[in-house]
Structures are given as structure tokens and as C-alpha cells.
Amino acid sequence: MKKIIISIILIGIVGMTYAQNKSFYDFKAESITGQLIDFSIFKGKKVLVVNTASKCGLTPQYKQLQELYDTYGGEGFEIIGFPANNFAGQEPGTKEEIKAFCEQNYGVTFTMMNKVSVKGDDISPIYSWLTKKSENGVMDSEVTWNFQKYFIDENGHLVDFVTPKTSPLDDKITAWIKK
């Protein structure tokens, strides 16, 4: 009986260690154009991950996200937008409609992904990792609304997040990018 208990404990420790060693680079997702993107292509870059919506009071943050990308995007920084329809049905469109909306209204050129779920039973794997300490090894969080922003460092580790109402041009975000 003692050996069984020790074995169960060791299996749990190994499982937790594996989960905490998983990084952002271990994920793949479909872009808004239908291309499968392996997030390992972002190695060496800081990445801001944002859940977005086209019919939200915070939708004008697309403009600020694009300004941030125009200023810092390139070799060392990337923004990845994940449209999500989890909050009051504020992202009802197809990927084609979302893409057209972002480009026509805000000139979005940063990486946009296909629509995902950021919470609930159908949460996407990347958002499960972002929000569960058991998976990211850093912290638990809950996506509370559209435009919540997660910081991923150059090594693919979750660093922090800011709430939806925090401007993409907030000092906390720009200082992190410049650091």
C-alpha cells in the first residue's frame, strides 16, 4: 500500500512538472486566414496575446494595438489577437468578416487568429494554458471580458496579464516591451 501511495505521488509530481514546463511555443492554432501557425515561430520575441471582439465597447483598442505594433512590432515583439465570442455575443462574425472588419476599420496588420473560446468547457488549449497555473506554472487567471492582455516573454513563458480596460499603450505594457 505504501508503494502504491508513493507511486501515485510521483506520477502527480511528474505530471505537474511536465505541465509547468510547457511553453507558449508548444502550441499551434489556426490563423484568421486558415493557416496553421506553430507558435515556436515566435521564439525570441515578446508576445502580447489579446482576446478581441468586433462589437464591444472596447473594440477601439484595435487602434491602440495597431499603434503599439507599429511602434514595437518586428524582430522583438508580436501581438496575437484571438477573436472570441464568449462575452455577450460580441464577436458573432465568421473569420472572413472579422478579418475584413479589422483591416477596414483599424488597419490591423498584427497576427490575427481564427475565433476561439477563452473560457468555459470549450476553452481553447492556448487559453487553458494562459489561465491555469497547473499548465503555465506561473498563475491562475480568468478572462473577464474582451481585450484582456497576456504577456509572454522571449522564452515562451507567461509573465503577467492586464485587465481588458487597460489601454494597449499603458506604461506597464510599453515598459515590459522595452525591458
Image (cartoon, helix red, strand yellow):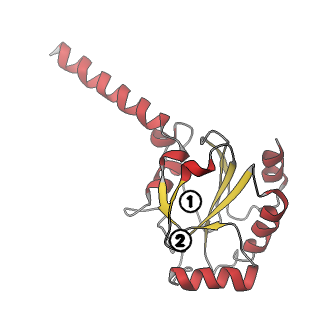
**SS type, badge 1:** loop
For image coordinates 43% across by 37% down, the residue present is 19
Comparing 29 with 143, the one in front is 29
Comparing 41 with 154, the one in front is 41
Q: Amino acid at mark 2?
A: Ala
Residue identifier under label 2: 84
Precedes in sequence: disc 1 or disc 2? 2
Seen in the picture, residue 37 relative to 95 is either above or below; the reply is: above
User: Residue 61 appears at what percent x and percent y?
Assistant: 74, 71
For image coordinates 75% across by 49% down, the residue present is 76
Residue identifier under label 1: 143
Residue extending farthest top: 2
Question: Mark 1 packing: few (<14 Cα in 10 Å), some, or many (20+)?
Answer: many
Comparing 107 with 162, the one in front is 107
User: Residue 113 appears at what percent x and percent y?
Assistant: 55, 68
Proximity of marks 1 and 2: CB atoms separated by less than 8 Å: yes
Viewer can see residue 167:
no
Is 144 placed left or right of 163 in the picture? left
Q: Which mark is residue 109?
A: none
In which quadrant will I find the C terminus? top right
- In the image, which is nearer the foreground, mark 1 or mark 2? 2
For image coordinates 81% across by 56% down, the residue present is 72
Question: Mark 2 packing: few (<14 Cα in 10 Å), some, or many (20+)?
Answer: many
User: Residue 58 appears at what percent x and percent y?
Assistant: 70, 74
Marks 1 and 2, how far apart in space? Answer: 11 Å
For image coordinates 37% across by 62% down, the residue present is 121
Q: Amino acid at mark 1?
A: Val
